[in-house]
Amino acid sequence: MGTRKYDQRLRAEAALQTRTRILEAVEQRLRTAPAEPLALDKVAEIAGVARSTIYTVFGSRAGLFDAFTDELWQRNGLGDLTAAVRAPDARAHLRDGIRAACRMFAGELPVYRVLFSMARLDPDSMGGAVAAKERDRSGGMTHLARRLDDQGALRPGLSVEHAADILWVLCSFEAFDLLHTGRGMDVDEAAASLADTAEQALCR
C-alpha cells in the first residue's frame, strides 16, 4: 500500500509538472509571437509534449485557454480584487477594486495586451477565454453600481445601468493601459486617476 501511494504521488507530481510546462509554453508563445495565431503544435513543441497530451490534460483547446487565463488572473492578484468587493463601503469597493485591477494588469502587461487584442480580433481562439472574464467583469460593474445606488452614493439622475456603463469603461484594461503606457503613469498613479474620474462621474 505504501508503494502504491508513493507511485500515485509521483504520477500526480509528474502530471502537475506537465500541466505547468504547457501553461508556461502558452505564455512564452504569447510573449515571443504576439501577432501570430496560438498554434497548439507550437505550444506542444515548446512544452516538450505531444499535441495529444494537451487534450489529455485540458480536455480541449478551449479548456487549455480557460485554464491559462484562470491561472494568469489568479497569479496576478484576482484575490485582491475579490477582497475589494467585500468592503462594507461602496466607495472603498470602487477605489480598492480599481487599484487591485490595475496592479493585476501591470503584473503581466504584455500578455494581457495580447489577450485583450485577441478578444477583439479572434474571439474563437484565446479571445473566448478573455470574453468569459469580461462577462464576469460586466456583472461586477453592475453589482458595484447597484451598491453605490443602495448606499445613496450615486449622483441624482444617474441610473444604475448608466453607472455600470461608465464603470465598464473606466475599469477596463484599455483604460489602464492608455494611462500607464500611453501617458507614462506608474500603476498607482493610473489607478488613482481612474478612481478619481469614476467618483467624479458617478458620485454625489
Image: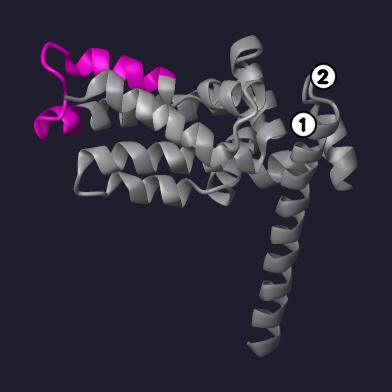
Q: Which amino acid does label 1 sit on?
A: Leu
- Residue displayed at 54% across by 27% down: 176
Relative image position of residue 62 (x, y in whole percent): 61, 30
Relative image position of residue 143 (x, y in whole percent): 25, 31
The quarter of the picture where residue 154 lies is top left
Name the mark on residue 113: none
Please name whichever residue, 94 or 50, is drawn nearer the observer in this view of the structure: 94
**Is 12 one of the magenta-colored residues?**
no
Task: Calculate the distance from the C-alpha at mark 2 to the C-alpha at mark 1.
Answer: 8 Å
- Relative placement, left or right, of 89 versus 123 is left
User: According to the image, what is the colour scheme of the structure?
Assistant: one colour
- Residue displayed at 12% across by 11% down: 157
Residue that badge 1 annotates = 30
- From where the camera sits, is residue 49 visible? no
Above or below 201: residue 107 = below
Please name whichever residue, 67 or 4, is drawn nearer the observer in this view of the structure: 67
Q: How crowded is mark 2: few (under 14 residues within 10 Å), some or many (20 or more)?
A: few
**Is 149 one of the magenta-colored residues?**
yes
Q: Which residues are drawn in magenta? A: 146-169
Residue that badge 2 annotates = 36
Q: In which quarter of the image is the C terminus?
A: top left
Q: In which quarter of the image is the N terminus?
A: bottom right
Give SS at disc 1.
helix
- From where the camera sits, is residue 145 visible? yes
Give SS at disc 2.
loop
Please name whichever residue, 37 or 200, is drawn nearer the observer in this view of the structure: 200
Identify the main secondary structure in magenta: helix
- First in sequence, mark 2 or 1: give its number: 1
Above or below 9: residue 25 = above
The quarter of the picture where residue 184 lies is top right
Q: What residue type is labelled 2?
A: Glu
- Relative placement, left or right, of 100 versus 164 is right
